[in-house]
Amino acid sequence: MAHIFILFKREFAGYFASPVAYVFIGIFLVLSAVFAFFIGGFFERGQADLLAFFNFHPWLYLFLVPAIAMRSWAEERKSGNIELLMTLPVSTWQATLGKFLAAWSVLGLALLLTFPIWLTVNYLGKPDNGIIVAAYLGSWLMAGAFLAIGMCMSALSKNQIIAFILAIVVCFLFVVSGSSIVLDSFKGWAPSLLLDTVASFSFLTHFEAMAKGVIALNDVGYFILVTMAWLYAGLLIIEQKKAD
């Protein structure tokens, strides 16, 4: 655990030693407010809740999280620091976990800094704050799943732009698999079991329930499972490249 904590501190500080974290957090806060209050019709809805805010999170994460994740391994490999990292008394899984927790903490910080939006809805009405807390938890778990996919794609390539594009493509498939556009293309010829299976892979399907305050074990377990699976896949890729 000590090695993981040291790597975590190194990686977390690294985000703020460059403009990466500041730019990410700034863009996330601005876009969150714009989507919630203007595009999401927060005032027009006339309801004291933050659904207009959380409904756009999957689409914000689709582009912003890969931008954070693309540097995790690609930069290490391009600069040659990965060889130095692997000579340290840390295992690959410790390095992977340290990097993940650092980036996930940056995402968590970005979410925490949206508290003025929460204060605004409490000032204007009487929302169910339990629902809002559940939605924040769901958003953070979903961000972790996006991040794990992005880190795996970063492990595949030394080029950060390629890693960024690959992460967007894979994450996009996970987001839209439960959308009506995709499911409608299966209706009429595919059995209901197949439709349910395709929909079950969607981040939207699992997050929408949590955004409404429903913390179901299967939704929480899904995001944790996706995160662990992609982190493990990234670990295997790093191990393979290290062997090469």
Image (spheres, grey):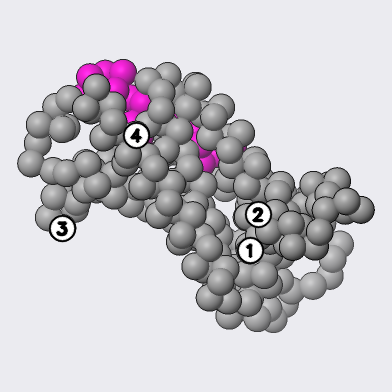
SS of the residue under disc 2: loop
Q: What residue type is labelled 3?
A: Met
Q: Which amino acid does label 4 sit on?
A: Ile
Labels 1 & 2 near each other (Cβ < 8 A): yes
User: In the rendered structure, which segment of residues is drawn in magenta?
Assistant: 63-82
Q: Which residue is drawn at 83% across and 49% down?
A: 186
Q: How far apart are marks 4 and 1 (CA)?
A: 28 Å
SS of the residue under disc 3: loop
- Residue under pointer 4: 237
Residue 76 in view of the camera: no
Residue 93 in view of the camera: yes
SS of the residue under disc 1: helix
Q: Residue 202 carries which label?
A: 2
Asked if the magenta segment contains residue 71, the reply would be yes
Asked if the magenta segment contains residue 20, the reply would be no
Nearer to us: label 4 or label 3:
4
Q: Looking at the image, tell me whether mark 1 or mark 3 is earlier in sequence order.
A: 3
Residue 244, image x, y percentages: 24, 22
Q: What residue type is labelled 1?
A: His
Q: Looking at the image, tell me whether mark 4 or mark 1 is earlier in sequence order.
A: 1
- Residue under pointer 3: 1
Work out which quarter of the rendered image holds the N terminus and state it.
bottom left
- Residue under pointer 1: 206
Q: For this rendering, which residue is in front, 135 or 145?
A: 145
- Figure check: 178 above or below 133: above
